[in-house]
Amino acid sequence: MALIYRERLDIGSESPQIMVGTHVFHKEPYPPLRDRGILLCGISEGQAFFEVERVDAPWHVLAFCLTGSGEVFTPDGSTHTFAAGQLALMPQGVHSGYRRKGEQAMQHVWFLLYCSSRWDYLNRAQPAIFNSQDGAALADAVRQFHREVLRFNLGDTHSLAVPALDYLCLLLERATQALNAKRGWAEQLEQLFAHVQKNLQQDWSNAALAAQLHITTTHLHRLCIQHLGETPNKIVFRLIMNQAKQLLMHGASVGEVARISGYQEIASFSRRFRQHFGYNPSQVLSKHIASAGHQQIWT
């Protein structure tokens, strides 16, 4: 996980929000949040422009939609709509964001959760949307917690911030209980390599793959053989070669495809391509050119 992260917060002045955070520079600080694995929590009214985006953030983001609708987005252009009665999960380390969608206010209660063992079950390779009826109860609990923290920070010795926080954590754990059900390894591997296929430009070493599932490289190797019948390296190689073939069939040059596929030398790429498919990449390109010429004659 990167120690440096980037975030973009574009929130209109007509979108008021309340929040409580762990640090003294947060709008309402309450350091005991950290012991519960929470960095920040709050409620946003989402009445005007609202869009946030984070890169390499070392925490999970949960957004429970109360009114209106929003959409989660990722750099590849994919979007996932979530509406009232739904929860959007943006896992730690995944470049993603969310924004208001439509004209109605997107009121939502949100949490930034530390990447700790308490929230391990929230780890995913991609953002996800779930049905949830717990948003209203969580919003009430956050409002009560916020009021008690205000009293605590004003020096009120009768503040109930601690029990209010404990109650909020119990509600949050109940709200995410369904996400805690362990997915089968086959499903997790399929999701992992679907993510790899969309991001083949990254360096997918065994260590990088294993880190996505929070397991050792030895365990990853064993699981891939058991469930997918291939080693992790062979699966990634096959995905790269299939992408290369598709690029060649669409007219990309051999040199360009070699570079995209991570090869510095065309000869090395051509040799591996031939070993995998049984023919040279130039033959794919030649067939594409011949096919294009044939179509042009008959146009």
Image (cartoon, helix red, strand yellow):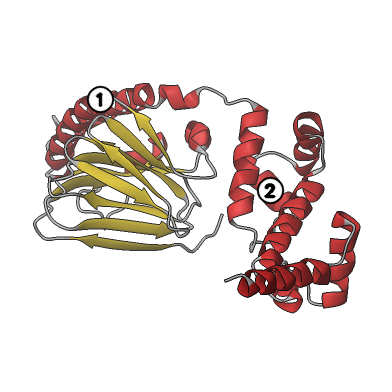
Q: Distance between the residues labelled 2 and 1?
A: 41 Å
**Numbered circles on residues, count:** 2
> x, y percentage for residue 265?
83, 77
Q: Is residue 117 left or right of residue 265?
A: left
Quadrant housing residue 273:
bottom right
Check disc 1 and give the amino acid type.
Pro
Q: Which one is in front in this view, the residue at disc 2 or the one at disc 1?
A: 2
| Residue 163, disc | 1
Looking at the image, is 197 positioned above or below residue 221? below
Q: Where is residue 108 in the image (x, y as percent from the top left)?
A: 21, 40
The reply to whether residue 177 is in sight is yes
The residue tagged with tag 1: helix, strand or loop? helix
Q: Extreme front residue here?
A: 298
Which image quadrant for residue 164?
top left
Which amino acid is tagged 2? Answer: Leu
User: Could you tell me which residue is drawn at 50 percent across and 45 percent down?
Assistant: 126
Query: What crowding class fits label 1: few (fewer than 14 Cα within 10 Å), some (14-19), or many (20 or more)?
Result: few
Kindly identify which numbered label has been placed on residue 209. 2
Q: Is residue 291 left or right of residue 212?
A: right
The residue sitting at 63% across, 51% down in the picture is 196
Is residue 49 or residue 251 the one in the foreground? 251
Q: Which mark is residue 226?
A: none
Mark 2: give few (<14), some (14-19) or many (20+) Cα within 10 Å.
Answer: many
Asked if marks 2 and 1 touch (Cβ < 8 Å), the reply is no
